[in-house]
Amino acid sequence: MDSKNVNIIIDGQSISTRSGMRLLDAAREHGIDIPSLCYKKHMLPLDSCRMCVVRVKGLAGLKSSCSLVVEEGMDICSMDDEIEAVRRTTLELILADHDYDCSICHQAGECTLQDLAYRYQIDAQGCRDFRAVEDRPVVEPDVTSPVLEFDPGKCIRCGICIQACSELQGKHVLDFMDRGMQVFPSPEYWTWKESSCDGCGECVQNCPTAALTEKPVNGRFRISDIDKRVRTSCGYCGVGCQMDLWVRNNQVVKVRGAGADVLPNRGRLCVKGRFGYQFLGSRERLRVPLIRKKGTFCEVSWEEALDYTAQKLAEIRDESGPDSLAGLASARCTNEENYIFQKFFRAAVGTNSVDHCARLCHAPTVAGLVRAFGSGAMTNPIEDLAGADCILVTGANVSETHPVTATYIRNARDRGAQIIVIDPRKIDLIQGSTLWLRPKSGTDVAWINGLIHIILEEGLADREFIRTRTDNFVALEEAVKPFTPRVVEDISGISEKQLRQAARLYGAASKSSIVFAMGITQHITGTDNVLSLANLAMVCGQVGRASTGVNPLRGQNNVQGACDMGGLPNVFPGYQHVSDPEIRLKFETAWGRAPLAAKTGLTVMEMMNSASEGRVRGMMIMGENPMLSDPNLNHVEASLKALDFLVVQDIFMTETSALADVILPAAAFAEKEGSFTNTGRRVLRVRKAVEPPGESRADWQILTEISTRMGYPMAYKNSSQIMKEIASLTPIYGGISYERLEDENLQWPCPSQEHPGTPFLHKEQFSRGKGLFHPVDYIPPAERPDKEYPFVLSTGRLLYHYHTATMTRRSEALNDFAPSAYGEINGEDLDRLGAGEGDLLKVTSRRGEIVVPARKSDRVAPGVLFIPFHFHESPVNRLTNDALDPASKIPELKVSACRVELV
């Protein structure tokens, strides 16, 4: 017998099952339906409802099968007259205290309690004799949350909502309040709106009754009203959560996280993913093509719009050469659409001037990790974080920008992992963390070198890993010698005691993982910062194993995929360099267009500079909004206005499309087929759930029509055909197909149909062979506070909004949580200004000024101002610095000098 299996008997049936398994799971896997109300397979057993009781031979009394672990030789009776009588009585007691109004309850059809009442044929009215109805406490429903409703009359006090909040999300917002008949789950004795609940809805998804339900967005409905449920990938951040869209009358009316066994999110969602879908049916959606005529947008046919667009682009190309045109691909669009976009510019136009928003967020990640490891992607899958012993989080407000990733970090914390947060801002993740270090903005290389200095000094380095798997260590060792804890404290403000503690925690752990985002990359030293983190991981041998690695979090849903597909000016799909003659020949042969350009194209900021100087005359922008997302917006605006021709493909009229000559209405993520690649290199299907509004089309269809009109025919029947072409030309995607994605979780590199995909990178050797240490010195930010501009300005994202908020601000619930912009400022600074909460502040930098309401907060240090960049009313990027990292050409969005005055 396999030592991992045990043999048991249930109701006379011999069963072989896995050792350590719970009896309830084992029974259900073999078709034995033991009832339960409070048990979820993906959580620890609560053992509260007592519906799953069984009799075990040799044990006294009845036992709860949800908490009973199988043992060799167990003989179990799951159903006899006595057991069924106990279950029936238990159910009657529960129903006696329940508002049993199935006839008007919109949860009917998806209520476990209702299902069991039907199974046991129990009439709720007949249960009233179990207690005096007049003794029942009256607790009013709580409908204060923007996203959920709580009806205590339907609560069975099972505790699943509390468990889901704490065990899965790691937030610990809910608990039982009061006692006896008055006990009910509640957030900290407050209403939901006043509590720290952020609206993720995990409690709603797991509630077995209608006690917790979503607030209706598109009207109430019954389960029987649903036309279909479609599995797809979330269109927000880079986690790539799998979700089921419930569709009624061509409208998404509900979103549920996919099953608890489905990666990467295991059923979890955040507030945006679960409740931020209202924008799909917005009346403000673009529905027909628009052409600017005499300064006014006019509705036109697709034929006219496509003909005109192709004609104008071809004229500019033929008059001024291919490099007079440039394009911005999109991290919001599918892999297939980004592939067609770069193919259009390289084959139909003839230029490599293709870029996208990764230039503003993770270009240093690609540049740095390719140099150090040979691959510029996240080394480990997101869910791996739950198994780490130590997690160093820096420059990443994970709970707001990647909320489901934060759940895995909190899961690790709750099982005892050491969490180190190194961030200038007091982010939510410091709650329960082991250590929080607050460096001065822009001093990352100094404190990372300081950590390495201490790790080497105290003998915490993995010398065997360094010897066998890396190069250039001696140079690194010399480079970090000057970064003593005292020197680092002078530069960064981190005390020697804290720095040593952090070094010891990270260096001594068996499995340490580094998580970072734009707080590390958006600097003139962004590439140096990433190289430094790679140095730290290699010094400790924390690469190439599960739950270790260097893990950049991509901000938008398909940043990774847009990079993979060649939405960059220097590489074809799969990071194959345009300067390589053999690579060019491969694509020339496949695409039937030669010669392809060998010269690296322009980056985003270079495009804008060239446009302002007249060298770039035309641009195509697909799903990007640089008029709110790019730094130094006054310059961006002047550059776009200087173009001879601008065409924008988008789903809404944005700040950018308002400047266009042609606007082409596109389909949103729920309205088309395709794939996204999440931040963990997992390729995920995107499926069409509803029809796009009006005449809008998928971006790839628009592009192929324009290309054909410009003399380079493209004819694809569907997005699956495009993926087959991608796989044929892109080695890391070589084994990926829609057929495999239906049943398999595939992470690139996946070079062949037989390859299972690669969960974590650099297992036995780095992609480049040996890891390469890079000695990096500290360089201060491009702009530091002075007498005229004494504050440090930093920007970032909020939980409730996404990028330039074109989607989230059209979702009512998310607007209720975060309706407007604000400037987060320390109370000491507010007092010095003679200002108070809500007062208007004028914020001025060397590039412009905005007005924003003040929010008093200890999340920022004195002398620092934080403003989220989502809001067009207070466009903070009018102030930010467009000084560039010389290696990756990313602008320094995280550090700008500014002046703050009371209006």
Image (cartoon, helix red, strand yellow):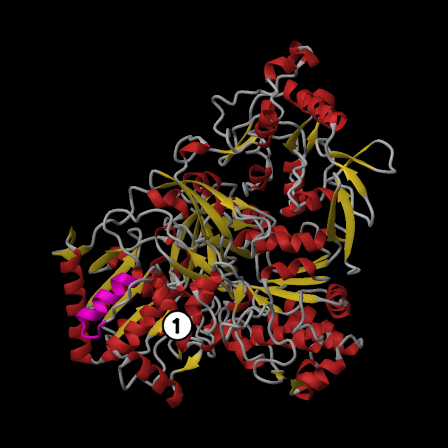
Task: Quadrant for the N terminus, please.
Answer: bottom right
Residue at position x 72%, y 86% in the image:
467
Examine the image and state in which quarter residue 601 appears: bottom left
Q: Nearer the viewer, residue 339 or 415?
A: 339
Above or below for 731 versus 895: below
The percent coordinates of residue 899 (x first, y second) are 47, 57
Residue at position x 66%, y 74% in the image:
536
Examine the image and state in which quarter residue 444 appears: bottom right
Question: How busy is the neighbourhood of tag 1: few (under 14 within 10 Å), some, or many (20 plus)?
Answer: many
Above or below for 8 versus 52: below
Query: Magenta span covers which residues?
Result: 700-713
Q: Amino acid at mark 1?
A: Ile
Residue 444 appears in the figure: yes
Residue at position x 38%, y 50% in the image:
670
Q: Is residue 646 left or right of residue 259?
A: left
Residue 897 appears in the figure: no
The percent coordinates of residue 224 (x first, y second) are 43, 32
- Mark 1 residue element: helix
Residue at position x 29%, y 74% in the image:
345
Residue 704 is inside the magenta segment: yes
Q: Main secondary structure of the magenta part?
A: helix
| Extreme residue in the left direction | 294
Residue located beneath label 1 in the image: 726
